[in-house]
Amino acid sequence: MSYQVLARKFRPKLFEDVIGQEHITQTLMNAIKAGRIAHAYIFSGPRGVGKTTTARLLACALNCETGPTDSPCGTCNSCREIAEGNSLEVIEVDGASNNGVDQVRNLTDTIKYNTSSNKFKVYIIDEVHMLSNAAFNALLKNLEEPPPRVVFIFATTELHKVLETILSRCQQFIFKLIPEKTIITRLKKLVEAEKCEAEEKVFKIIANASGGSMRDAETILEKVITFCGNSITEEKSLLALGLVSSDFLFEMAEGILIENVAKIFVVISKIVNEGRNLDRFVKDSIEFFRKLLFLNVSPSIINVLAFEDNTGKRMNELSIKFKEYQLLYIMDLLCELASNLKFSYSPRTLIEVAFVKICHSRNVLPLDQIVKKLDLVQDRLLSLLKQTPKDSSDNEKISQIEFNFEYIKNKWADFLKHLELKKLMLKNYLNDGILERLEKDSIILSYPESSVFSAKLLNEADYRKELDIELSSFFNTHLSYQIEVKSTEEIDSTNKSETSDEQKITDFGNLSSNQNEFVSNALELFDGKIINIKNADKKGV
C-alpha cells in the first residue's frame, strides 16, 4: 500500500475523534439518534478544522449498514466505500472546479434516481462559495423541495459569499479554530503513534505555526519528522520550518531598549544568513510585542498567556522597561510592515528600515502629550503678547494717537488677506460680520441675526484664542474682540452712518481741478491717503 501522510492516516473515524468541534459533533449525533436529519447542512469556518471530515462522518453515519447511527462501524462495505471515495450514494464535488450552471444541472439530474438498499443519497459540495449565481439558482429548487432520503452538505471558508436564499434553507454550523492546548495534545498522540520522541517545546512551536488549523499542524509535524527523524529537537524543528527562536526576539527587544541599531542589523543578518523565513519572523515579532503590551498593561495576564519555563518571567521583566505608548507605536509599525512585506521586492530592506524606526520609538511622543505641549506654546505666546511691547528700536510701536478705529478700519482688508493665507475659516467667519468700533483694546464686531452661526463659532474658546493671537500679532499690540448680534434694522442704520462718512472722502473727486491737483501732489509726496475731509469755517478763512 502506498504511503499516507499523517493527516490522512489518522483521519477521524468517529464523531468523538473530531477535536475542538464538540458543539457541532454532539448536535449531529443527537439529531441522528432522534431521527431529526435535515435535508441540507452548511459547514463554514477556517481551513483545516474538520469541515469535510465531519461531512464524510455524517455520510457514513447515515449509510452505515448498522445505521443510521451516531457511531458508524467503519468496517462495513458502505463505510469503507465512503472512506475510499468510491461510494455511489455519496457524491463529493469540488465547487471551485465545478462552479458552472451546467455542472450543477448534471449533478441535480442524478438526484431523481433512487439509491440502492434504501440508503441516503448524500451530496458533499466543498468550497460552495465558488459556485456562480446561476449555479446556486439551479440548486435552489432541489433545496426547496428535496426528494426523500437526499441530503446536501455544503462546506465553505467564506460564508458571506453564499447566497442568502441558499443559507435560509440550510442548517448552519460554524467551525472554530482549534485551541493551542488541544492541538498540542493531539500532536503528542501522533508522535507517540509514529514511535518518535520530541522535546516539549517542539509541540508549542508547531501548534503556534499552525494558526489553529489541525490539518496544518499535522502537515507541519510530517515535515519535522521527515527532517529530524525519530528524535525531534527544538533547534532542528526551527531550522526545518525556517522559524526564529525566542532568543532572537529577546535580543531584538533588548537592542530596541538601548537604541542599538547596529545590534538590530546583526540580528537581522543572522536571520537572513541562516535562511529563516522573514515573513514568519515579522509575524512572530508581532506576537512577541503583543504579549509584551498585554503584560505592560496588566501583569496579572501572565497566567492566561501560559508561558513555558522561565519565559514568562523574562517577558514580564522586559515589559516593565517599555512604555505603553512605545509598545503601541511598535505594534503599529510591525502591523504596517507585515502588510507591506508581501508587495516588497526587497523584504530585508523593508524590515531593516522598520526596525530602525522602532529603535527610536522611545523618542516618539504620544498624541495627548503633543497636544498639551502645543497648548502650552499657545498660552505662552498669549502671555508674551500681553506683556510690554517690544522696544521701538526693534519694531516701531504705533503710538496711542495713531492707533485708533480708523487705523484698524484701513488695515482690516490687509488683515483679512493675511488670514486667508493662514486661517481661511476664521477669515470666512469674520466676513459675515461688520467692523463697528473700538473700545479700549477690544474690537467690536456686529453680526446680523442671519449670521448667528458664525458669531457663535467665534465666541468658542478655541476660535477666540486663535483670533486673539492673530489680531495681536498683526497689529503689534494686545488686541481682542467682542461679538454683538443685532437685528437687520440696526445693521442697516449703522451702514448708512458709515456711508455718509465715506461720502465725504469720495467728495475728493468733486474738488476743482486746481485743488485736486494740489491734493494729489501732497499725497504722492508724503505717501499718504485721505482719511477724512472737513469743511473749513468760512469765517476763519
Image (cartoon, rainbow, N blue to C red):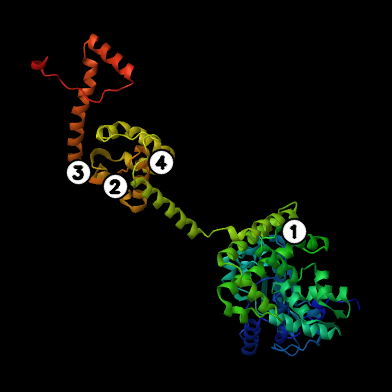
Amino acid found under the numbered disc labelled 2 = Ala
Query: Is residue 331 found left or right of 453 in the rendered image?
Result: right
Which quadrant does the C terminus fall into?
top left
Q: Which residue is mark 1?
A: 265
Q: In x, y percent, where is residue 521?
A: 30, 13
Q: Which residue is mark 2?
A: 455
Determine the CA span between mark 4 and mark 2.
16 Å
* Disc number for residue 424: 4
> Tag 3 or tag 2, which sits nearer the N-term?
2
Residue 40 is drawn in which quadrant? bottom right
Query: Circle 2 — which element?
Result: helix
Query: Circle 3 — which element?
Result: loop
> Tag 3 or tag 4, which sits nearer the N-term?
4
Please name the residue shown 25% across and 33% down the image: 401
> Tag 1 or tag 4, which sits nearer the N-term?
1
Q: Nearer the viewer, mark 1 or mark 2?
A: 1
